């Protein structure tokens, strides 16, 4: 069964993704991630996750040392601060965050977006 036809929303993937994206998983987590195209299945250095956030969720400023990130908003309104720039992203809008760039995000409404990271980080096993 390939990654597109199976539900990859298993605890190991969810917790590894949150650890990678947030530097730790909030308890209890209000973030939902579904690994749509995990690097563990493709062997490629890229991961794709479907993310749902409740209104008001805030991800504090952080950096990804080893991966670039692309955010594609499917629904809702997401505020993304990248470096010194503030972006308000609605459905169909996309943002790119280069590795090493400080960024933070806030769901201005219930938000669904796709996160693409250029490394096997989203579903790597805990060390």
Image (cartoon, helix red, strand yellow):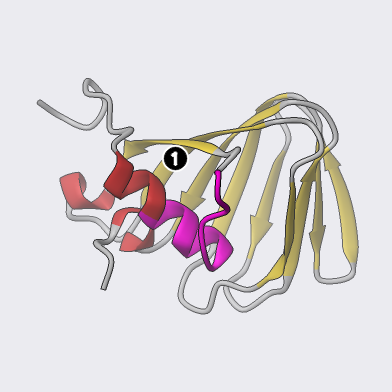
Q: On the rendered image, what quadrant is the N terminus found in? A: top left
Residue 48 spot, x, y in % from top left: 41, 43
Answer with the quarter of the image where residue 119 lies: bottom left
Q: Observer-nearest residue: 72 or 112?
A: 112
Dividing the picture into quarters, in which one does residue 82 lie?
A: bottom right
Q: Determine which residue is flagged by label 1.
A: 49
Of all residues, the one furthest to the left in this rendering is: 1
Find residue 31 and report its image quarter. Answer: top right
Q: Quadrant of the C terminus?
A: bottom left
Of residues 57 and 63, the one nearer the viewer is 57
Q: Is residue 125 left or right of residue 94?
A: left
Q: Residue at x 44, y 40 (%)?
A: 49
Q: Is residue 86 left or right of residue 116?
A: right
Which residue: 81% across, 71% down? 83
Residue 65 image offset from top left, x and y in percent: 52, 79
- Compared to residue 30, the image places residue 109 above or below, namely above
Does the magenta portion include 18? yes
Q: Which residues are magenta?
A: 16-28
Which x, y percent locates residue 123? 31, 53
100 vs 2, left or right, is right
At mark 1, the secondary structure is strand
* Magenta highlight on residue 76: no
Q: Residue at x 55, y 44 (%)?
A: 28
Label 1 CA crowd tier, 10 Å (few <14, some 14–19, many 20+): many
Relative height, residue 35 to residue 68 (above, below): above
81 above or below 90?
below
């Amino acid at each position: 069964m390939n990654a597109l036809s199976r539900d990859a929303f298993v605890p190991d993937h969810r917790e590894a993704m949150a650890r990678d994206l947030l530097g730790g998983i909030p308890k209890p987590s209000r973030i939902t991630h579904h690994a749509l195209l995990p690097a563990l299945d493709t062997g490629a250095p890229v991961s794709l996750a479907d993310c749902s956030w409740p209104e008001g969720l805030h991800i504090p400023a952080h950096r990804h040392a080893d991966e670039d990130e692309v955010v594609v908003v499917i629904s809702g309104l997401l505020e993304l601060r990248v470096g010194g720039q503030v972006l308000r992203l609605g459905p169909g809008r996309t943002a790119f965050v280069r590795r090493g760039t400080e960024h933070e995000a806030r769901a201005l409404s219930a938000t669904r977006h796709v996160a693409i990271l250029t490394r096997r980080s989203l579903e790597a096993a805990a060390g």
